[in-house]
Amino acid sequence: MINAQNPFFGKYNTPHETIPFDQIEISHYEPALLEGMKQQNEEIDAIVGNPETPSFKNTIIALEKSGALLERVSSVFGNLLSSETSDEMQELAQKMMPLLSEHSNNISLNEQLFNRVKSVYEQREGLNLTKEDARLLEDTYEGFIRSGANLSGEDKEKYRALSSELSTLTLQYSQNNLKETNNYELVLTKEQLEGLPESAIEAAAETAREKGKEGYVFTLHAPSYIPFMTYTKDRELRRQLYMAYNTRSTSGEYDNTDIVKRIVNIRLERARLLGFDTYADYVLQRRMAETSDAVYDLLNQLLEAYTPTAREEYKEVTALARKTEGEEFVLMPWDWSYYSEKLKNEKYNLDEEQLRPYFELNNVIEGVFGLATRLYGITFKENKEIPVYHEEVKPYEVYDKDGTFLSVLYVDFYPRAGKRSGAWMSSYKGQWIEEGKDSRPHITMVMNFTKPTESRPTLLTFSEVETFLHEFGHALHGMFASSTYESLSGTNVYWDFVELPSQLMENFVTEKEFLNTFARHYETGEVIPDEFIDRIRKASNFNVAYACLRQVSFGLLDMAWYNRNEPFEGDVKAYEKESWAQAQILPTVEETCMSTQFSHIFAGGYAAGYYSYKWAEVLDADAFSLFQEKGIFNREVAQSFRDHILSKGGTEHPMVLYKRFRGQEPSIDALLIRNGIKKP
């Protein structure tokens, strides 16, 4: 019996039927998830038991629309596990994830259901389907195949057990990382802060007050860790914090080493059950890259193009360090940010701390939202009547250029103990069209920016502004969604295409016309000086080759784990160091390990897909060159990007959509030219 007191049941009496976060208690999730699974099972039974001949409507569309309550509840639960979790939430997740995995498997391994889907698929040529209908049918059929529907009885049960174990392990991996990150504190005295800017010192004092500690507390959260590694003069303290950060989950209570091995081996075993040699082969079948060879071709092209410049960058930073440290000095990873910042200052007279006063958060919001208004005509209105899951979250209504409602947008800026590190975009409600009504999406952007202090507001670093633009690009992809079916809507695209909208937006961060719209000194109101913008532009390719090889190294590591055709039983650290050796510029440190904290590929959606960032960078450099050619605020180019990319979701193959926008396939040349590796 449904409990009327549970807010998940019944209509939400909130603006735009947004989630009533203020009414939801942890006790509401389990009964709502169980009821959601029960209702979807009944819907599946109705599809299977339908005496009519299987058709697109009574099978494919009916399946697409099943599970509405479950989706409603799990979207809230899943999002809050990342952005506002607690021990109680994590315990509940460990209890519910196996049940949810089993439920999903029960659908994908339902033989009678698959037979109906297969029947419709086999008559697809005569059904007179639209492009979007055909795409939904193809995705549905392939989804069943890729989830084990064609397996024999014994193999089906094996697949089911592996899937359940994998869902538990990926959750445990994430929780271990979060706990390791939250548990570490570096407590310092005033005398140990030499070199740190006032903003970092104030933030550390604020953290100490929050934690009830004397002195100054530094953590492994990005707004604390990055300034510390960039400015702290004491090399031993830099080494300490670096080692704490880069040995997370390598030992002790929250050790992920064995979990890494098991996740890799489960994914391989599932792929082999489905007839693939490697997990990468399985993943890449549904990617733009299509094959491991294509991924390695991209990574090798980047290695060849950027390695000579990266080595020169390393020599240059080392030379500067040796001026003060002596000729025998060996530049280690914990020295890189510190001496790179000094070199950037020396070459371009540019210090990120000089720029902070011009990037007060409210002004940046105004600038980023204003950019969307200028490009697409959309507007943003904060609505405090929309409930939020934490007092720091800002809810906005977004309106299209004709004044019609477009989307809800939640923005969550600051680190908290219940929030994982990094930055991401997600949704609480997707977009779809039903009976002529366009049901609009509810999008969320989550970041971990520098918090305000008692004496100053939130002042962002230049790289935080870039991160804001990146996540906002994802948000636009979600907000502009215009598809009939939710599963094809918004960011439901191939994984190596999903980063194009986000990385395209990053290009604006060095454009003077854009910066002049919002970058004002928070105390004087002075617009950012032209000389600062000139320095930003000149410094935009500073150490760009090192940064590229760092991303390539992550791509190589990812492929090393998932392009294997044999189970892994070796030493995780040793295997990691061997896998990415050709892309390493700095000396390696024996005890460190990326794999135990590489959530993107072990607990996120980027397994055998981390190369996507560089793949999309090739696309975004090529795409933005059209904005540069026609004018960076050109409405026609922006509208074309909206019409052909942002609004289309996964309704067509991404290369078809890209060529429709750009008129050509992309090449790596635009990226090499932008980075100064190749002359125009």
Image (cartoon, rainbow, N blue to C red):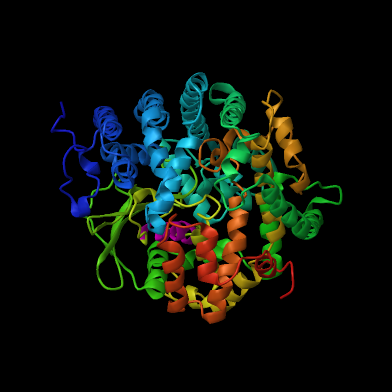
Question: In the figure, 201 relative to 577: above or below?
Answer: below
**Residue depicted at x 59% and y 63%:** 619
How many marks are shown on the rendered structure? 0
Q: Is residue 454 visible?
A: no
Quadrant position of residue 545: bottom right
- Determine the image quadrant of residue 530: bottom right
- Write the residue at 68% across / 33% down: 564
Q: Which residues are magenta?
A: 468-479
Q: Residue 30: x, y in percent?
A: 28, 27
Examine the residues drawn in magenta and state their main secondary structure: helix
Residue at 72% in and 52% down: 297
Extreme residue toward the left, this view: 4
Q: Using residue 425 as the reference point, say whether residue 623 is left or right of it.
A: right
Vertical comparison of 564 with 527: above or below: above
Q: Residue furthest top?
A: 154
Residue 342 on image: x %, y % = 69, 60
- Identify which residue, 201 or 659, lies in the foreground: 659
Can you give x and y, in whole percent of width and height, for residue 38 in the image?
26, 28
Quadrant in which the C terminus is drawn: bottom right
Q: Residue furthest bottom?
A: 630
Q: From the top left corner, tell me how far across and down residue 520 is, in percent.
A: 44, 72
User: Which quadrant of the structure image shows residue 113?
Assistant: top left
In the rendered image, residue 469 lying in the magenta stretch gets the answer yes
The correct choice, above or below, for 386 with respect to 76 in the image is: below
Quadrant (top left/top right/bottom left/bottom right) for the N terminus: top left
Q: Any magenta on residue 365?
A: no
| Above or below: residue 512 compared with residue 317 | below
Apparent side of residue 48 relative to residue 82 in the rendered image (left or right): left
- The answer to which of 234 and 474 lies nearer the viewer is 474
Q: Is residue 283 at all visible to an observer of this figure?
A: yes
